[in-house]
Image (cartoon, helix red, strand yellow):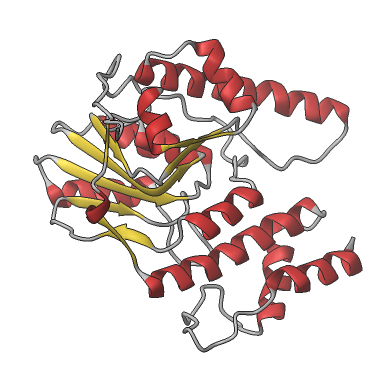
Amino acid sequence: MRKRIMPRVMAQARPGAMPLPIRQDVHAFTKPEVFDRWGQNAAGIRAVAYDDNVITMFDSIGEDYWSGGGVTAKKVTSQLRGIGDRPVEVHINSPGGDMFESIAIFNVLREHPQPITVKVMGMAASAASVIAMAGDTIEIGASSFFMIHNCWVYAMGNRHDMRETSEWLEPFDQAMVDLYAARTGQNAEDIAKWMDAETYMSGTQAIERGFANALLAADAMKVDEDAKSKDKDVNDLRALELQLVAAGATRAQARERINKIKGTPGAAVEATPGAGEEVPDWSGRLASFVSKNS
């Protein structure tokens, strides 16, 4: 017998605003491994139809050097202003990005006076999962995923610096625990454990745990092959940048090196590889680059 997933009543819709960091020089990123998983399982997934009250988030969260885009609070505010005093749909398929930018976007969405429906298509990982919590109703594809984890940053320094960074991050991890708990009705201790373990939840699991209300119809989504190729290509560049930073490069140095590798003077990916074109082996070139510069 086919199991029917019933909509779940949320403990609280659109919880209160989340705290924003005072320090603007720190950014909480998505791990390279998450970008890889998004590229493998979720790249190119889009909605079949759009209305003029839809905000799409099919990019990384925060200003994105490699795509020339990115999802920001400023852009979302502008889109909401254009939609006006009407219900809004937010379509999400994102590997995440800057956690603190996602908090700003969440706060912007929760101020909208009309109902917000969030539709998770592909993946709402890391920072994108925070944004999804702003929906009055959250729908998710059966094969789509939520992913939650603790704030993840790159930090350098001695043990005192590391302790200071750890203490600075704790309130934001706790704020996410509180947000997820208020939205889902789940025990805060369980949520903290899921975040510690970096937990992926399928559509049915997300509904059972209260992260979503109902499943999206399968025919509401499609895979755009052109978008998939471009998504994966840009995603590789994002992951490479973070891996080079982990190896000790600054972001500026990492971007300069990657631009040399891909042989183009600009930052954003200019072309989408077609089916007959060979996609560069970024991982192999990165390994060689890291070994020479570490």
| Residue 66 visible, this angle | no
Instruction: Tell me: residue 244, above or below residue 257.
Output: above
Based on the displayed image, in which of its 4 quarters is residue 214 positioned?
top left
Q: Residue furthest front?
A: 1
Which residue is at a point 84% across and 71% down the rendered structure image?
A: 288
From the viewer's side, name the closer residue of 13 and 221: 221
| Residue 208 visible, this angle | yes
Image quarter where the C terminus lies is bottom right
From the viewer's side, name the closer residue of 230 and 4: 4
Image coords of residue 278 (percent x, y) = 59, 85
Based on the displayed image, in which of its 4 quarters is residue 35 positioned?
bottom right
Which residue is at a point 44% across and 42% down the rendered structure image?
A: 145
Image coords of residue 246 (percent x, y) = 77, 51
Q: How many marks?
A: 0
Instruction: Tell me: residue 215, above or below residue 205.
Output: below
Image coords of residue 102 (percent x, y) = 44, 39
From the viewer's side, name the closer residue of 195 and 55: 195
Image quarter where the N terminus lies is top left
From the viewer's side, name the closer residue of 188 and 14: 188
Image coords of residue 224 (percent x, y) = 35, 69
Instruction: Tell me: residue 229, above or below residue 166.
Output: below
Q: Is residue 15 left or right of residue 180?
A: left
Based on the displayed image, in which of its 4 quarters is residue 277 positioned?
bottom right
Which residue is at a point 77% across and 72% down the rendered structure image?
A: 284
Which residue is at a point 23% across and 29% down the rendered structure image?
A: 136
Q: Is residue 276 left or right of residue 184?
A: right
Q: Is residue 232 left or right of residue 1?
A: right
